[in-house]
Image (tube, rainbow, N blue to C red):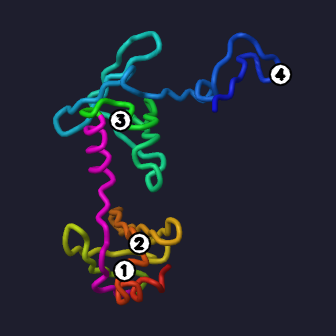
Amino acid sequence: MQVWVSKKGLNNMSENKYTLADAAGIVYLDSDNARFFKEGDFIGAELRDKAGDSVRHTRVWLHRSFPFDMPFEYISVQNKDGEELGLIRNVSAFDKETAALITEELERKYYTPEITRIMNLKETRGFSFWRVMTETGEQSFTLQDTSKSIVRIGADRAFVFDICGNRYEIKSLSALDKNSYRKLELYL
């Protein structure tokens, strides 16, 4: 749905109409006005403005606006100073190669191993020490203030954030074995 707002205000509609995205200064990026590329180990972008002028950014940062529910929609593209250059509505708005490049960068940045089993969980002095099995193998990590470090998403999904800022996902709490769930349920 597009809402039109007059440049002269809501009460005095004129021919100079623009959307709320225009009013907010949001620039939507797609294959018409943006090209992404690999610059060494980093991702860069060449962006065209409405006048057709291009600006090349040798490094940009991609941030998910809705990381849990829409991981490949509404991706904020920011420069080195954290200023938003534009917003990708959906990665699928780009050709397969560019979409793969953007997806690879997002997957690298938001790497989240899935916890499939909790092998050991001990709490001491406000910290909990975890030894878990993930789809990539055994991992150990530490949480501070365990209850606040576990975020439930819906009724059956949870994310665990360790003291180093790493994320782990439990895709289905009900799919965990009994022993794993018993170790975890105190904190849910």
Residue 138, x across and y down, in percent: 20, 75
Residue of label 1: 176
Whether 108 is drawn above or below 52: the answer is below
Q: Quadrant of residue 177?
A: bottom left
Q: Which residues are magenta?
A: 99-124
Amino acid bearing label 3:
Lys
Residue of label 3: 80
Q: Quadrant of residue 73?
A: top left
Asked whether disc 3 touches disc 2, contact meaning CB atoms under 8 Å apart, the reply is no
SS for callout 4: loop
Residue of label 4: 11
In this view of the protein, which residue sits in the foreground, 47 or 137?
A: 137
Q: Earlier in the sequence, mark 3 or mark 1?
A: 3
> Residue at image x 24%, y 68%?
135
Residue 93, x across and y down, in percent: 39, 31
Asked whether disc 2 touches disc 1, contact meaning CB atoms under 8 Å apart, the reply is yes
Residue 21, x across and y down, in percent: 59, 28
Mark 1 or 4, which is nearer the eye?
A: 1
Residue 49, x across and y down, in percent: 43, 17
Mark 1 neighbour class, 10 Å CA radius: few under 14, some 14 to 19, many 20 or more: some
> Residue at image x 26%, y 44%?
104
**Which corner quadrant holds the N terminus?**
top right
Q: CA distance from mark 3 to mark 1?
A: 41 Å
Mark 3 or 1, which is nearer the eye?
A: 1
Q: Earlier in the sequence, mark 3 or mark 4?
A: 4
> Residue at image x 59%, y 24%?
22
Say the numbered circle drawn on residue 172: 2
Q: Earlier in the sequence, mark 1 or mark 4?
A: 4
Amino acid bearing label 2:
Ser
**Is 72 left or right of 39, judged from the image as shown?**
right
**Is 174 left or right of 7, judged from the image as shown?**
left
